[in-house]
Amino acid sequence: MVVTANPHATDVALAVLRGGGSAADAAIAAALVLNVVEPQSSGLGGGGFLLHYSAADGRMSAWDGRETAPADVDASLFLDASGKPLGFHDAAVGGRAVGVPGLAKLLGEVHRHHGRLPWARLFAPAIALAEEGFPVSPRLHALIGGDRFLAKDAQARALFYDAGGAPLAVGARLRNPRLAEVLRVLARDGADAFYRGDIAAAIVDVVNSGPNPGTLSLADFAAYRVIRRDALCGPYRGWRVCGMPPPSSGGATVLSMLGLLSRFPLAGIDPDSAFSRHLFAEAGRLAFADRDAWYGDPRAMPLSPAQLLDAAYIGARAQQIALDSSLRRAQAGQPGKVQRAVPAVHPERASTSHVSIVDAAGNAVSMTISIEDAFGSRRMVRGMLLNNQLTDFSFVPRDVRGLHPNRVEPGKRPRSSMAPTLLFAPDGRLHAVLGSPGGSAIINFVTEAVIGLVDWHIAPDALLARPHVGSRNGPTEVENTAEGRALASRLALFGQETVVRDLTSGIGLVVRAPQGWFGAADPRREGVAAGL
């Protein structure tokens, strides 16, 4: 079973499985196709996180392909001359926020450990699509037309706009021969070819020139490594939930929310009631307060996820959830009375993609990949959009109470909210593979899905169609649908301050069914589920 964010990627991944490929092979081929057909969201100019499950021995691998900061940066990277934080797009557009991309090496390492088909074969579909082109979808057309910065880059302007300067029309064929050539080089020479020679030199040149330049070097590319980490797992009502450890805050914050909610008998509460949504929002406030205060590159965190997820600590935090009133804004906890760094909250953008796959042998991949903002830094090199992931660092490095663990430093990996997730049933069998794009709201989207599966046994399609409600330790966000607006008015009875907005998740969900696997793609985007 395959669920990806685009029909082209789903078709290619399914063909890889049909041809005897593993879940890892299918995920690699899908990621490369997504670079071609969904360039605003992910690609070789960015990075990501991947969870792999081996059915034969039950082993999990957590692969960290997150971007890294250049060696020549310091904590003032996103401060102006007066020491004040830059506006988001003042920081994001241009070379300043570009980190060393990790996706190419991530795919290479995963293939080396879990691949079955030849590496070059996995590139062929993406190369063909880049060369021959594909019809521009309504979603891509709208995103191009709505972006204020993309056309300022000459390569992007030539690729995404017609001769008159208008966004490519719906149905127009988008061809990217420059990207096809990069893909050919990687197919022939391996993932390391991205980090040396002409490709790396071209990226360094573009990042360090033009408006708002950065400081990437060839040495930064040569030093880049994918890190194989231990998956972060925790219990929920007898089930086991596994996700990514830091530098992603996604896995830990999902587990924190589930721990906070475990004291409430959700199975006996109407899932569509304002009361269940109130409890969920309050758990989000508490979990996000800790996320904002404590999480970053694990080398800089003063506390470990184990301390922040300790059952006694989470239980004490849960006591703050009232049944009939809202915290409005929660304060971070202090396990062990360690001095808390002050949260430096900033927007984490929602331009990301997700792939969920289970192969015929029961091996599984949950992979979330991103270039951060829509169209990333709006700097294009050889058909690839470059990330602006360094804006996921805290812009303000410190205040009177100390340094923030997510401050900018050379070689660090910025905090992420990407939350590829594997859910295991009480009998130990893999039950679900999931994840989503959506910036920091990913955490709420994934937690909602886990609760829907475990507590309420909601069918996957129905689960993904429900309106989102949650808090990131600010106003309670309610999805702008008729059902969502009705929920917002009822949440006011619990003292919730609500804001109604679009919450464009893109959950890819694969769930065990009696005869195999059932897949569901989020109806808010272009995703498709398909199986053999």
Image: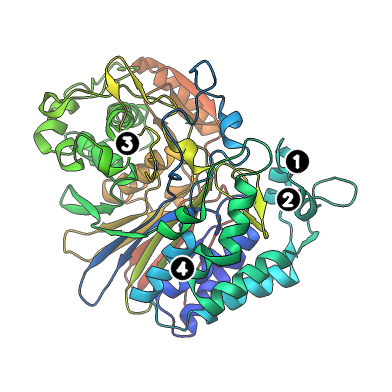
Taking the image as shown, residue 288 lies to the left or right of residue 92, namely: left
Residue placed most toward the observer, 60 or 272: 60
Q: Which residue is mark 3?
A: 270
Image height check: is 32 above or below 521? below
Q: Which residue is mark 1?
A: 152
The residues bearing labels 1 and 2 have C-alpha atoms spaced at a distance of: 8 Å
Q: How is the image coloured?
A: rainbow
Q: Amino acid at mark 4?
A: Ala
The residues bearing labels 4 and 2 have C-alpha atoms spaced at a distance of: 27 Å
Say which of marks 4 and 1 sits in front.
1
The residues bearing labels 4 and 1 have C-alpha atoms spaced at a distance of: 33 Å
Asked if the residues shown at circle 1 and circle 2 are in contact, with their CB atoms under 8 angstroms apart, the answer is yes
Q: Mark 3 or mark 2, which is nearer the start of the sequence?
A: 2
The residues bearing labels 2 and 3 have C-alpha atoms spaced at a distance of: 49 Å
Q: Amino acid at mark 1?
A: Lys
> Quick one: label 2, few (<14), some, or many (20+) residues within 10 Å?
many
Q: Quadrant of the N terminus?
A: bottom left
In this orientation, does residue 74 appear? yes
Horizontal and vertical percent position of residue 416:
39, 42
User: Circle 3 sits in a helix, a strand or a loop, which is it?
Assistant: loop
Residue placed most toward the observer, 390 or 70: 70
Say which of marks 4 and 2 sits in front.
2
Q: Which residue is mark 4?
A: 27
